[in-house]
Image (spheres, helix red, strand yellow):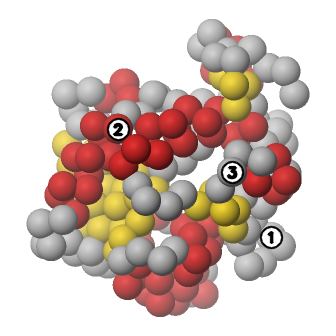
Amino acid sequence: MGGLDKGLEIYLGRPLITHVLDVMRPVVSDILISANRHLGDYQRLGYRVVEDLHAEFEGPLAGLLRAMEASKGRSMLSAPCDTPRLSEEAFIRLMAVYQTGQYDLVMAHDGERLQPLVMVVGTHLKKSLADYLHEGGRRVDAWAHRHALGIEDFSDCPEIFFNINTIAELNGSSGSRSR
């Protein structure tokens, strides 16, 4: 998005990240925000903010690892800040599959492709993730397939995975920028 901090861009009158926080809040006991810039802006949202260990951007798995390290729970729910149409129901469905005990992590599938950042992951995988990053790995799905991976089918509601990656998408989706 041209160097903009996506989570803080305005969508439907408020920062993009707040849409995800609103549906996550009722289903989890603790929220962590992974961010590497504008930390004060994210902290003002009222949640703990964790940043990657290294100055260079290593991708979403580095943020996931930091959150896993900071988490007090045995599992974590993950969602990217650019998916404002996610729902509580989606998170509940993912957690129900994870709670069967059959999987190390559970990811969403929209009927056409995996949505690898929308997942429940066991925090016991943090060493595996650290090793994968140390090896130079960056692909979320490649790391996930090293473990017992459960997949929840959301082909009944693929529109919830709409994500905003460009200013044109942000502006063309009834959002208005004000940063």
Q: Position of residue 73 (x, y in %)?
A: 41, 75
On the image, numbered disc 2 is attached to which residue? 88
In this rendering, would 28 be left or right of 69?
left
Residue 56 shows which numbered tag? 1
The quarter of the picture where the C terminus appears is top right
> Residue flagged by tag 3: what amino acid is it?
Gly
Instruction: Give the mark toward the camera: 3 or 1.
Output: 3
> Residue flagged by tag 1: what amino acid is it?
Glu
Q: Foreground: 109 or 139? A: 109
Which residue is depicted at the point 26% across and 56% down?
95
On the image, numbered disc 3 is attached to which residue? 46
In this rendering, would 127 be left or right of 66?
left
First along the sequence among labels 2 and 3: 3
Query: Could you give the CA–CA distance between mark 2 and mark 3, rounded to whole angstroms?
Result: 20 Å
Q: Position of residue 65 (x, y in %)?
A: 56, 75
Q: Secondary structure at mark 2?
A: helix
